[in-house]
Image (cartoon, rainbow, N blue to C red):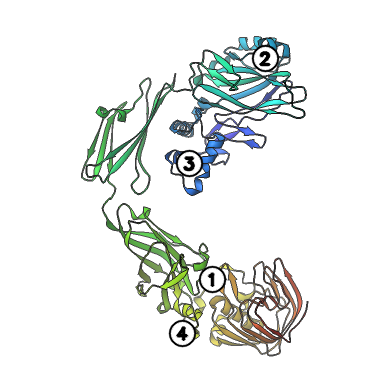
Amino acid sequence: MKKFKGLMISTAVLLCTATAGAVQANAGIGIWGDSYGTFCSGDINMDEECTVADAVLMQKYLLGSLSQGEKFIAENIDIMNTADLNLDGKIDVFDFIIMRDCLINPDNQNEISWRVDSFATAKKEACETVGKEYIFTSAEQTDEYFRNFAYEDCSCIGKYTDDFFQDNVLLMKPVFEDSVGNFYSINKIFYDGNTMNIDYTYNYFGEISEELDVPVLLLVTVPKSRYHAEEISWNSKKRSWDFIDDILKPEISEYNTFEFTSPDGKQTIFVNQSARKYKYEDSVTEIEFYRNFDHYETLEELEIIGTDTVYVPFSDEDNFTVEWKDSSVVFTFTADKEYVFEFDYVNTDVITQTITKEISNMEKPEIYSVDLTADCSGRLEYKSEIRDMYRIDVMTSGTVGLVGTPIKFTLDEDVSDASAVMHYNEDELRWVDENNLALLSYDKVYQSYYRCNDAVIDTENNTITFGVEDNRIYVLVDDIEWTNYWGKDRTEYRKEVNVLSYVSDWERGYNTGDIMNLCDKEWAMANAPDFRVSTPEQLASVVWYVNASGFKCSITLENDIDLNGYNWVPMGYEATGVGNKFNGTVDGNGYVIKNMNINSNYYNTGFIGIGGSDIRNITFENANITGGICTGIVCGSTYADFTNVNVSGNVTSNGRNTGAIAGYAPHSKFTDCTHAI
């Protein structure tokens, strides 16, 4: 059984092979199924249950306001009829009302359920003589008919009791199965206003039989509250039942949208009014007040239950009044009682407004909020968007010297004089001195960065104020790193920072192995940028310095270093355009690094993960390296030149570009280098 939230609804029509006795097959309104599965009535988003989410999608479908990502829903509705709850062959507000009623009042479920109750194998002779369609209204009538028509062991006899017929009627139609197992199966049942259609498929398992030999009784249960026909007839050409005086067609139905505009033309309120009345049921009128100035906004909804009276208050101009005041509008109308609703005006004048976007990014925590101020009518929150683009836009996420997350602004055409304020957390700046901050804007069309010369950096209040253009991405950078990227050495500009309080992006988001247990940050800062290394602890400190800062440095060994027992990680890393490459040189000075073990799933794996300019006079003995794409003992990916570099050990990779010394080194030169892999 498929489930509504809070109620049960019967499953789709199952493909059933008729056999001796009865085979059960249940169906709900507007549901269909095939041999690959079943579908739940009202289950528009195909999650196997009908919930408020499906009601929202149906409403959007009816209003024509599905987003690009939801437009596939329209096809699902049309193809599968999951939304045609009143079986009238179309999807309209009455289906939405039924869905809403079922979600709010679970007891109403029985009011919309059909059921294909069973198949029963019948006597061929009886079918040939009296094989017509019937409607049964009593247990006695049903049992007498089945005794004469069906096999003696037909399970239908005695199944339908007087209690059953208090609430239901039973429809019967013979269908047929032949001797080789070919049969008709039911796909779906739907009502098109005049006809209850039984859509079935002829299934065959062998030669196609010209005529089906064995009659089968198709039995359909219909609640009396949904069916009051005096006679039925089977339309063989349409393969459906034709009804007379059927309750499934409303006696009265009306759907209208009314538009009310203020005398100055600045305010517009819409009213949706839908009403329906079925036989033997109370009338239902639903009224929705909404506006669509800068977005669709429901102001008020109500449901009016009548008896024989169908209330359509807005269809009669004498039955309602609209009063436009200085700052609000009042609707007064009469239905089962008098109703009064007052709605404030939406701002239509161009005024200056400010909205705030909180930024919460654990990887790049420096910027924590952004304020946007602009002139517009309506509400700025619906006419603009502030978006964190980190790891969404690859180009700006990999900006050299990036501080915080890239921020994108999208503005509607009528938004003007836009400016923004970025708020940064000084404690999260880490390496970066506030006086080194600079703001850039990135134009995706021209793929170019522009320096925001109008940006004002307030180091006292920790803010950056700047003008905003539509569809631009703004990035805050360390100007020293940014300018260094374009050829200017940044090390001479480095400011004093509290190294011990610094937690780098690498430490926050990546596997650091045993590096942080071994490294001495104070030693690294005191000996940078020209490191002379003789112990595992000193080498680990250099790895931290490179991965945390990306600063240029040189490494010279002064002794053999044994890394046995340590979980080592690459020096220099990059992931999706983000990271710090090793920007420097390594001189082994004839010494050996022994027993280096790196086990990584990342690409760019080796002693140097990515980067390097000159590597010489060094030996790696008994190295054991495991990585992804671009893996080697000395370098994963590099443009460095290698002189007198010797390696031995094992290299394992789950991707391409794997080498003994370097995984990917398309422009490197190798002089007097050897390997034993």
Question: Which amino acid type is shown beneath numbered disc 2?
Answer: Ile
Locate the C terminus and report the quarter of the image it occupies: bottom right
Q: How many marks?
A: 4
Which residue is label 4 attached to?
493
Q: Which numbered disc, 4 or 1, marks the residue that appears first in the sequence? A: 4
* Pick the front one: 244 or 227: 244
Q: CA distance from mark 4 to mark 1?
A: 21 Å
Which residue is label 1 attached to?
505
353 on left or right of 5 = left
Q: Are dots 2 and 1 in contact, CB under 8 Å?
A: no
Q: CA distance from mark 3 to mark 4?
A: 57 Å
Residue 146, by quadrant, is: top right
Q: Which numbered disc, 2 or 4, marks the residue that appears first in the sequence? A: 2
Q: Are dots 4 and 1 in contact, CB under 8 Å?
A: no
Q: Are dots 1 and 3 in contact, CB under 8 Å?
A: no
Which residue is label 2 attached to?
157
Q: Residue furthest left?
A: 326
Q: Identify the secondary structure beneath mark 4.
A: helix
Q: Which is more foreground, mark 4 or mark 1?
A: 4
Locate the N terminus and report the quarter of the image it occupies: top right
Q: Identify the secondary structure beneath mark 3.
A: helix
Question: Which amino acid type is shown beneath numbered disc 3?
Answer: Leu
Q: Identify the secondary structure beneath mark 2.
A: loop
Estimate the x, y position of residue 661 in percent, counting from the top left: 71, 78
Q: CA distance from mark 2 to mark 1?
A: 76 Å
Residue appearing at x 37%, y 19% in the figure: 308
Q: Which mark is residue 57?
A: 3
Estimate the x, y position of residue 673 in percent, counting from the top left: 73, 84
